Amino acid sequence: MFLINCPFCGERDQSEFSSGGEAHIVRPKQPTELSDDEWAEYLFMRKNIKGIQFERWNHVHGCRKWFNVVRDTSNDKILSVYKMGEKPPVNYK
Amino acid sequence: MPNYRIHKTEYIDETKRVSFKYDGKTYFGYEGDTLASALLANGIHLVGRSFKYHRPRGIVSCGAEEPNAICQIGSKKDLTEPNVRATELELYEGLEASSQNCWPNVKFDIGGINNFISPLIPAGFYYKTFMWPKSFWKKVYEPLIRLSAGLGKSPTEPDPDIYDHKHVHYDVLVIGGGVSGIIAAKMAAKNNLKTLLVDDKKILGGSTIYQNNEFIKIDNKLSSEWLKNEIQEIQKLSNLTIKTRTSIAAYHGYNFLLAKENLTDHLPEEKKQNKIRQRLWKIRAKKVVIATGSIERPLVFNNNDRPGILLSNSINKYLDYYGVTCGENIILFTNNDSAYETSISLHKKGIKNLIVDLRKSASSELIKQAESLGIKIYFNHVVTNTFGYRKINSLEIMKLSEDGNTTVGDKIKLSCDCLGMSGGWTPMVHMHTQSGGKLDFRDDDQVFLPKENSEDQISIGSCNGDFDLENIIDKTVNKINKFLDIDNQDYQDTNIICSKENDKRNIWLLPNKIPLGKTKCFIDFQNDSTAKDIKLALKEGFRSIEHVKRYTTTGMATDQGKLSNMHALGIIADTAGVKMGTLGTTTFRPPFTPLTFGTLVGRNVGKFFEVVRKTSMHEWHVENNAEFENVGQWKRPWYYAKKGESMHDAVQRESKAARDSAGILDASTLGKIDIQGTDASEFLNRVYTNAWSKLAIGKCRYGLMLNEDGMVYDDGVTTRISENHYLMTTTTGGAANVLSKLEDYLQTEWPELDVYLTSVTDHYSTASICGPNSKKILNKLFPNLDLSDENFPHMSFKEDKLENINCRIMRISFTGELSYEINIESKYGHSLWKMCIEAGKEFNLTPYGTETMHLLRAEKGFIIVGQDTDGTMTPSDLQMDWIVSKKKYDFIGKRSLYRSDTIREDRKQLVGLLTDDPKEILEEGAQIVSDVKSKPIDMLGHVTSSYFSPNLNKSIALAVVRSGKTMKGQKLIIPMENKNINVTVSDTIFLDKENKRLNA
């Protein structure tokens, strides 16, 4: 069970959070301009990385804030936590 | 009665005699005994029958690894417990236990016949046999398998015991209170770290606590005496919490561990009353020290499973800790030094014993000591067979060949009444691997050892493969200093004297002159799998250890293969000619020992099982005979049956009253989200499919919300309360998810929008009054409110006061009738409801539940998200193209509405269905076809909603059908188990297509 450091509330048990999948997938500003394939890329395609993954979490049973997490999916270690809108840390690639 | 308790020990209180029943017969033991030690003291070895062959089985061990001595405790329907290990169960006055898996009794067991037909039941017997004929499955094979499956009997009534949960945080958790765990806990606590030490036994000290060999000394004291001092010292440390009778069940990521504390299992019946039985500790530790020790391995030879054959070290513990000898003429069969400790202990108590050692020779201090005591040792010998049905009475040994692959020379027959086996030691790496740690293999003594850690944890002592005392203490101190980053000098000058093992020889499957096929060399005692089974599995092509395990069921019993997994691996490696270290292990899964469901559930039973949400009108519904339906966590009135009415009767009456005069529904459970901010209108534009900018203040609008994939997600009416203030309603079940979804978009995609969302579902209660007389009732409640269609038209909103309390009134309709929803602060909900009922009396205002609501809306063809949709329906599929704005540039899901898949014309689409026989009511979920003759039958869709409409006096249904939009008027068939029902595709709106009733 993860211990997640919510950037607004501090360390809390995983049971207070819900996961929102891969981060930094920006909703296209002009969806109507996109082909089916381009839209499908946004809608369905996820990297599902074994290793360092950038993902979104929501402190759903807490402050209700969404934020970003860098997690190594091979050992579940959370390497970094940062707010929405902030730039992802560069030292993880 | 024989008495095998031959001396007093400090752990057995001989002043406190305890009586207990085993298999219906009364015996005596003492306080401090386990059930196993008390049985052995009474000379009882035979405690059960094996699972498959029903062979007599005896106590093998003294701890959690016990495969045989598992018993049924108690006989009460609610309290009886199966599969309890007698080796761990502390004896108490009045304990009733019985053996399992035998009938009529353990001494004469009918199933024992399986032993004689065992050549007919090899590995995979069930897979191979119960295959044909197919017709035999249901009537013959399944009942047969069910009859012989399982071990003990489950309780058949609810568990009356109390269980508890506790959350704790520590700097350091030490698992295991043996010598290394005690040292680690002391070092941690003395260095100002908040420490928890847990041990599954009644007292701390592990196997050192009963050690009394003068060749093993610490600071010139017996190691047990030295350790007792240490225990006294740590008990004074204020930083240290010690929990005995507490076992770690699971080690999860982020150093989150579950421990089970036994609080009353050792108490007599009357003292258990009203106390918490077991407590589940949920532990978060910054650092974890694993000191779980090791367990002794059995040896694999012919007939190694007879009662009276135990692990050598267990014989030692029964003797030195419990004062009980397992026999009077004992043979120890070993491949390592530890059996010599047992031998010397036995010798000291005057118990005749001798040693059979696989090794060609050995030269440690212990061996010299045994030799000097005159104990007979057969080096380079192997046990090839044992004899005695209900208990061992003799055995045969033979000399090993040079390479150890075969036996040579003549058989020597030796008589005995007990055999101790020692095949070396297996470090308990369960916790390490559960935490995500990897393992290394040490060829020397063939053990898996902790290697890499993924958590902040460390293994010390024999679970780390350190077996002699000097090694254990030195390494523990060094590793703990480093691990905790401290500099503890307490053990700097500790002087340790112990014997060092120099010689090793391990043979996983011991050689025998008898062909393997005719031997019974057991690997897994509880599941009865033998060396032969493993070899057969390999011969049949199984290679992966995980497959061999499942095919032979080795390691799959309640002991999870604590004694058997290593041997299975070893034999596979030997047979396949590969290195054991390269095979890997099967997965060590939690829990380490079985847990009761009660412990896991804790206090969340009965009415605490799940949160129940009730509206403020709930009591009225109860008083008025409502049947309730669970909608999410909410209790919603389903229907209100009058005396003698069935559900069908009640729903027909309610539906009719709502259309003929007036009905009232408790709509408080609908999700309500308060939306405020200067960009609220723009926000609604983006989340709903229709346009919102032009909605006037005081007006309401129905909205459909999609997922980004274009599928309908939720719907509801939103009211514009003021310029920058809206009240959104959602489906009852979808409220929380909708709020999360909206927050997601606001926070991540559109942070520039000035919008604030607040859930107000619980803040308002809602009474919805519908029907032609609803306006008259409203008028009685709100005499000053102008209810004229001009002032208060359909889809609009007014505020007024009811006895000085503010109400929000929306004229909106989910039934197609003229209809008003009155919202009031929740605390006044009950009063509002009663005032509505009172005002409606003269108009036969009839309370109706969710079933009638569903019927009424179906008559109007209104969808219910989640009933008529299933996450694969677009607005167009629902024939709701009218609600999708063509003008808006974007909204959630818009782009998906013209993907190649969503514009397909043969998607499943919502239609109405009318049965040819108007009395026939379709089953929801029933399949729809057009032709039952051609096979395979093409499934076109299914029924989503179906009712008998009293207002139309016929059956109506909604359904999703492939290309349904184009099928109006077509005949379709609903094939049921015993008939085909003919239906005709119709419009989805069955009643009042012109919406005249809204303004009636």
Image (cartoon, rainbow, N blue to C red):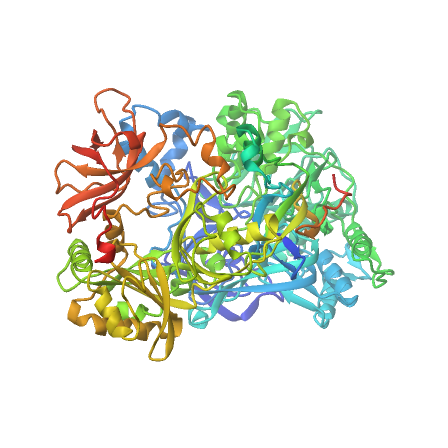
> Where residue B485 sits in the image (x, y, percent)?
82, 57
State the residue at coordinates (33%, 55%): B156
**Would you place residue B903 above or below residue B653 in this image?**
above
Residue B313 shown left or right of residue B969 in the figure: right
Of all residues, the one furthest to the right in this rendering is B493
State the residue at coordinates (25%, 29%): B929
Residue B865 in sight in this render:
yes
> Where residue B865 sits in the image (x, y, percent)?
37, 47
**Would you place residue B706 above or below residue B777 in this image?**
above
Q: Quadrant of the C terminus of chain B?
A: bottom left
Residue B322 in sight in this render:
no
State the residue at coordinates (61%, 32%): B569
**Which of the 4 image quarters holds residue B849?**
bottom left
Q: Quadrant of the N terminus of chain B?
A: bottom left
**Which of the 4 image quarters holds residue B782?**
bottom left
**Which of the 4 image quarters holds residue B650?**
bottom left
Most foreground residue, B252 or B152: B252
Residue B768 shown left or right of residue B600 in the figure: left
Of all residues, the one furthest to the bottom in this rendering is B804
Image mark count: 0
> Where residue B483 sits in the image (x, y, percent)?
79, 54
Residue B360 shown left or right of residue B801 in the figure: right
Most foreground residue, B252 or B243: B252
> Where residue B912 sits in the image (x, y, percent)?
24, 39
**Would you place residue B229 above or below residue B456 in this image?**
below
